[in-house]
Image (cartoon, rainbow, N blue to C red):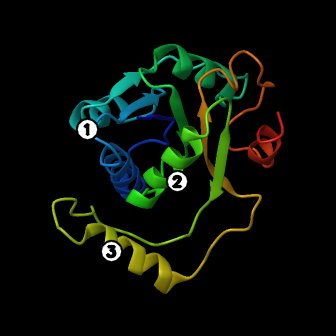
Amino acid sequence: MITFFTTPKPFRGHIGVIQRNAIESWKRIHPSAEVILFGDEEGAAEAARDLCIRHVPEVKRNEHGTKYLSPIFDAAQNLAHQNCLCYVNCDIILLSDFRLAAERVSALGGKFLMAGQRWDTDITAPVDFYAADWEATVRRLACEANHQRPPQWIDYFVFSRGLYYKNMPPFVIGRPGWDSRATTL
């Protein structure tokens, strides 16, 4: 159905909890969903092993150590078993309605891009993904926080294989504006 790929911050403290919650939510989107984690940040290999996801430690970086996106996007498309791919920031929890939207867009056929912004929610502990109401709990917390980021805060890109292959400019992670420019390629 879909291949998720991302690159994390170090898996330390609260951000480690957030990133593990996010990745676990992606795995639950669909039984055939795959996840690829790019980067050699502290704890990445262990998290990938614990979460049973693929880990690619080698990532091209600039002289400041900042990761380039185009090699990550290209490698993900080479490694993916699915024709629908999703680059998603490593702190984003996805719910089942994400799957429905991705299925609808990809069913249209041809090349496609679906992008979206996030709702900030302060989840400080591991989500109990075995609880029947975990999605309802996360959705309630997001609604209670009621803090959606503006449209330039794009946190995921769902796209057809090949859409970005070998044609993305040398964007780097974490710099303002790369995400909104990537939607116009």
Residue 79 in the image: above or below residue 172 = above
Give the mark, 1 or 3, whose residue is nearer the N terminus. Answer: 1
Residue 83 in the image: above or below residue 92 = above
Asked if residue 68 shows in the view, the reply is no
In this rendering, position of residue 64 left or right of residue 109 = right
Q: Residues within 10 Å of mark 3 (few under 14, many from 20)?
A: few
Q: Position of residue 100 (x, y in %)?
A: 46, 54
Type of the residue with mark 1: Leu
Secondary structure category for the residue under label 3: helix
Which quadrant of the figure has residue 152?
Answer: bottom right
In this rendering, position of residue 74 left or right of residue 145 = right
Viewer-nearest of discs 1 and 3: 3
Type of the residue with mark 3: Ala
Give the mark, 2 or 1, whose residue is nearer the N terminus. Answer: 1
Q: CA distance from mark 3 to mark 2?
A: 18 Å
Secondary structure category for the residue under label 1: helix
User: Are the residues flagged by discs 3 and 2 in contact, CB closer than 8 Å?
Assistant: no
Q: Which mark is residue 101?
A: 2
Which residue: 49% across, 27% down? 39
Q: Residues within 10 Å of mark 1 (few under 14, many from 20)?
A: some
Give the mark, 3 or 2, whose residue is nearer the N terminus. Answer: 2
Q: CA distance from mark 1 to mark 3?
A: 23 Å
Q: Position of residue 88 (x, y in %)?
A: 54, 44
Which quadrant of the figure has residue 125?
Answer: bottom left
- Dot 1 corresponds to which residue? 51
